[in-house]
Every structure is written in structure tokens, then in C-alpha cells.
Amino acid sequence: MCYAIPGKVVGLKKNIATVDYFGEQRTVLNEFQEIEIGDYVYAQGGVLINRIAKKEAKEILDFWKDKFFELKKIDRKLSDVENIDASPCLLEILQKINLKKRLTEDELQSLIMLKDKEELKLLYETANNIRQKEHDNACCVHGIIEFSNYCKNNCFYCGIRKDKDIKRYRMKVDDIINTAKKAVSEHGFKALVLQSGEDDYYDETKLMKIVTEIRKLNVLIFLSIGQRSEEVYKRLFETGARAVLLRFETSNEDMFSKLRPGTSLKERIQLIKDLKEMGYILATGFIIGLPGETNKDTINNILLTRSLGADMYSFGPLIPTAGTPLADHPKQLKDSILKIISITRFVDRQSKILVTTALETLNKDAKREGLSAGANSLMINITPKNCAELYSIYDNKAGMTENINRTIKDTVELLYSIGRAPTDLGI
Ligand code: 5AD
Ligand code: SF4
């Protein structure tokens, strides 16, 4: 199973390598490997993570040779925009998008308010077309390990908030490392997200051990462990973690302080900025549909994500969850999330946009629909089943009941069916 295509190093300047994939070249940062021109390597998120033997690379590339171009052809065909009628106002905005002009906040608002089915179709197709132009058919597929459902916080929306009476678990350090080893050796993952509630049981020493050992597997390590001190994050970067997933949740200060008692939006945003500054690949974003949220808030959320320099946008619908203060809050509609995916693609053409589990929870077909509305990243849950079931940040979480091999197979089949290559071809 491969989640990344090996590329051949064709240029080297200090720690910047140029990597060739069937004639397409990408530059990647090399901090970890001794390499020379002619070597075969894997890159994730623009970071060179592994060098592999020529024989192995050639075997994989032999498989990919035809598939690579075949998938691109399918994707290109599916990314055409059908000519349909739309209001002059929408056509004018789409024209501006095609000319790569920045949209005003009013224009973004008018896109959020679209309701007409045909116009929505046009919106999604236009976003998908831009995704194809900017990223071709590459789609990141990261594995996620949810290693603890303890959390010291009490976010109103969250099913593992401190005050909720649920069965708690903490994976042992060795079990986390072994789960990562299995994800790499059996399933071929090249990037792993390590996620938990904000759980200080995993102190700097434990986290460093986890990162040190998983780094040896030559994978891109994403940390999703909540707010820790700048020092801890610095040490973990030095140890080999290269990406973080930390949402700011909402850009509205009032909503933030009501929904996340005892925490501050300013501090969270400062930390996100510090992490970016430290050199982490940044995944951040927000929840859609929190109580009191207006369309203006949503637009502000997208614009804040961009201004933080997000490499990957992570946002999804609020899933009202039993036993939390927001249990009775209305559910989001799938189209309201797909619209935000498309608008995000217009606002930040270069970004990676994740189809989140929350969206999949809302709708079974969401992976395909999200990827066809401008998104280009996925995560597969590889947490051992007994733990995954307890990591219940919201009710009926998608991707938990199936077995991992099945989920991977289904995901790869889905990607192939829409012409996407589960690969990361650099920045
Ligand atoms: N619905 C949707 N997303 C949620 N999160 C937590 N609870 C919910 C919920 N009920 C999200 C938060 C957090 C991420 C790990 O999960 O945005 O950052
Ligand atoms: Fe903890 Fe994150 Fe849930 Fe808030 S959203 S309670 S910080 S796990």
C-alpha cells in the first residue's frame, strides 16, 4: 500500500532538494536525511522524510507509471466546470475568482448565502477546478492516532470535556509507538497525527520519547495535543515533530470565552503564531455552527486561518453531542459546510483543505463531496478500536466502526474513482 510516490532527487542546494515525479518537479526541505542526486525519496508536506532503496522505488514507480497519468486524466475530466445559468452577481464573482482577484468580504458573504441548487453546483465545480489547477490530483492521506481522551478543559461543544462522565483511557507510550510502527510498516502511512485531549499526564519527557521513536520511522509527525508551553513545542520540534494541528475554534472573542471557559483566544492565537514562527507546518481552523455564530464570523474564521499562514485548513460542523451544554443545538446542513470548503479554496488557492471526520459524521458521502468541492486532504483513524470508541469528541463519530484495512481500502478506491492520487507532491 502506498500513500506517497517516491521521487528522484534531481537537484540539491544546501538543504533544498528538487525532486522529480514522472517529469514534474517539486522542491522540498531536507533536514533529516543524507542524500545525493539520483536517490529516491519520499516527501510529505514539503519535507523530505525518507530515502528509499532504488530497487524498491523502481518497483513502486513501475506500478505508478501508468496509474499516475490515468488518474490525472480522470481528475482533469471531473474538474471541468459545466456551463450553467447563474445570477449575474454570481457570474461576476466567479469571473473575479478565475482572474485570481481577491474577493471582498461582501462578495464572500454573498457566496455563503447561496441556496439555489444549480448555483451551489457551480460553486463547488469552480472550487474543484481551482483545486485541480493549483494542486493537480494530489491528496494527502494522513493517519491519526487518538492516544488519550483525558482533557483538563471544559469546552461546551466537546464530548470528552472534563466534566463529562465518560470512561477515560490513556495509551501507554510504548503502545502509541507500536501503533505508529504498525501504521507505517503494515499500512504505509507517511504522515501521522498524534491527537489527545489536553492531558498533562504526557509531559515533556513522555512526549519527547514518543516523538523520538516515531521520528525513527521516517514519517511526518503532526502534533495535536492542545495548548502547551512554547518551550515544550520547541523541544518537540527539535526532537523531530514538524507539523501541528491546533484550531483556534472561533475568531469571535465573546463566543470563545463563553464556549471555552478559562481559556483565552488571544493566548491561543499567540501560540499558533509562535508555532508557525518555529517552523511547524500549520494546520488550523474552526468549528462551523457554534451558537451565536453569524456569516460574518464564518468569513472572519476563514480569513483568520489565512492570515495565520495555515498550510492546511481544518474545519468542520459542530456535531451537537449528548451530555454537553450544546446537546440541543441545531445540526448543520451538509451544503453549509461544502460552501465553506469552496469559499476557502477561493480565498486561499494554494492551501490544503481537509475533509474532517465531523463532516463525514454529518453525511456518509461527505469524503467524495468535500473532495469535489475544493478539498484535497483526508485523515484515516488508526487508533486501536477499543480506544477509538472512547475518543468520543462527538456522537456517532465516522470512521470508528469499520476496520482499518477496510477503511484504507475504501478510501483509496474512492480516491482512484475520482482520479486522485493518495500522495503528497511537496509544497
Ligand atoms: N463537534 C464538532 N467538532 C468538535 N470538536 C470538539 N467537539 C466537537 C463537536 N461536538 C473539535 C474541536 C477540536 C477538535 C479536536 O475537535 O474543534 O479542536
Ligand atoms: Fe479538550 Fe479539545 Fe475537547 Fe476542548 S475541544 S474539551 S480542549 S479535547
Image (tube, rainbow, N blue to C red):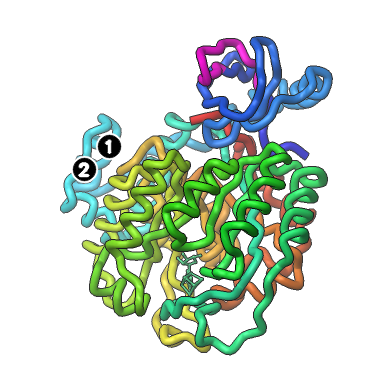
Q: Which residue is drawn at 66% across and 76% down?
A: 390
* Chain part drawn in magenta: 7-18
By secondary structure, the bulk of the magenta-drawn segment is best described as strand
Q: Is residue 16 magenta?
A: yes
SS state under label 1: helix
Quote the CA–CA distance across marks 1 and 2: 7 Å
Q: Nearer the viewer, residue 134 or 237?
A: 237
Disc 1 or 2, which lies upstream in sequence?
1
Q: Callout 2 environment at 10 Å: few (<14), some (14 to 19), or many (20+)?
A: some
Tell whether 181 sits left or right of 272.
right
Q: Can residue 373 be seen in this view?
A: no
Determine whether the beta carbon of the residue marked 2 sits less than 8 angstroms from the nearest atom of ligand 1: no
Mark toward the viewer: 1 or 2: 2
Residue type pointed to by label 2:
Leu
Q: Does the magenta stretch include residue 357?
A: no
109 sits left or right of 427 in the view: left
Amino acid bearing label 1: Ile
Q: Position of residue 141 (x, y in %)?
A: 62, 45
Q: Position of residue 173 (x, y in %)?
A: 72, 61
Q: Mark 1 points at which residue?
A: 97
Which residue was labeled with disc 2?
103
Whether 276 is drawn above or below 301: the answer is above
Q: Name the residue at 39% across, 44% down.
A: 276
> Is residue 417 toward the left or the right of residue 106 in the image?
right
> Is 76 left or right of 183, judged from the image as shown?
left
